[in-house]
Image: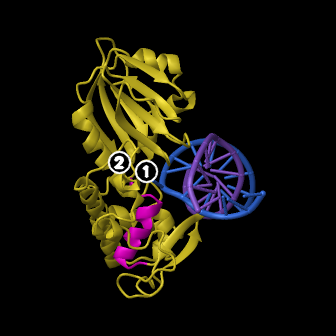
Chain colours: A yellow, B blue, C purple
Amino acid sequence: MPELPEVEVLVRHLAPIVRGRKILDVQVYRAKTVAPTSPSEFARILRGTRFEEVSRRGKYLVFGIRAAQRSGPSALIGHLGMTGRMYLLDADVALPKHAAVVFYLGRENFVFEDTRYFGRLNFDARPFQRLGPEPLEVEFTVESLGQALARSTQPVKVKLLDQSVVAGIGNIYASEVLFRARVSPCTSACRLKADRVAHLRKAIRETLAEAIECGSTVPLDFSGYGDREGHFYFGRAPRAPDFYEKRLRVYDRAGEPCARCGCTIRRIILASRSTYYCPHCQRT
DNA sequence: CACCATGTTCCTTG
DNA sequence: CCAAGGAACATGGT
């Protein structure tokens, strides 16, 4: 569940149901998930604390925690990797096969499930140092984006995936943003002129805001025990409402007609990641 | 068996 | 020091 819109929707979902809850016990099933803290230390630090506010930075989740008294970390930091999920589960329901960390809250468990174990849940805030601006905040200006892009000859799509340029865009929304901006994913970052950078910034903000809006207006099943229709980030589901179908315009649509011009959507590889675009609408 | 998958970090090379 | 490219991490779907 990895890009900024999905994380934002998850944060909004979790905040009201987790805030104020006391962690009675902690079980770490994957030591690597909580590294560099050891599982025993991780549990010792969190046992007896309460969750406070939940927020987000880029694709990272930030859980404020209030210890009983002693000093210690004030926040638990989570990253979903490629397949991470977080949700409350009734205590009498069996844990999923790939539960990485489970917090016992009483009648419910707070579960971090992660099939591929690329995700993290620890106290390590160092990754924040390398993050660029939040795309939906005022700090994300045409100037900051232009300066970041001007230093590279790489394809602009590759730079959108660089979290130090702007935080939160992943492989799906990189293609979606460029389609909206009508910019070719292959365009060298430093060759984009000021007006195109401004257009790109606008497309980034609109694409992400729209995705958050979409995820916020749909009943979601974060536990993943329902079918794919409950997970808006999968983009397309057979019997989903129309806006599910229309949400992703080019991602995973190779061979399909472009919604704007009818030209066939292409798939290419950039920096060893699949990239989708309309060769007619995105010529430069 | 082959290839693909929402991400980040580390290592090498220039 | 930096930029760029690729492997590694790990599991499952097709």
Please say if the residues under marks 1 and 2 sit with CB atoms less than 8 Å apart. Answer: yes
Q: Is residue A166 visible?
A: no
Q: Amino acid at mark 1?
A: Pro
The dominant secondary structure in magenta is helix
A34 on left or right of A55: right
Question: In this picture, which residue range is highlighted in magenta?
Answer: A167-183
The number of numbered badges drawn on the structure is 2
Instruction: Give the residue at x 35% y 56%.
Output: A232
Q: Position of residue A214 (x, y in %)?
A: 26, 60
Q: Alpha-carbon distance for marks 1 and 2?
A: 7 Å
**Residue drawn at point x = 31 percent, y = 18 percent:** A49
- For label 1, the crowd category at 10 Å Cα-Cα, with few meaning under 14, some 14 to 19 and many 20 or more, is many
With respect to residue A255, does A147 lie above or below? Answer: above
Front residue (pair A151, B12): B12
User: Which residue: 38% across, 19% down?
Assistant: A46
The secondary element bearing badge 2 is classed as helix
Residue wearing tag 2: A7
Quadrant containing the C terminus of chain A is bottom left
Where's residue A259, x and y in %? 36, 81
Q: Secondary structure at mark 1?
A: loop
Is any atom of residue A52 visible in this view?
Answer: yes
**x and y, in percent, of residue A151 in the image:** 48, 65
Depth order, front residue of A176/A100:
A100
A49 with respect to A278 (left or right): left
**Residue underneath mark 1:** A2
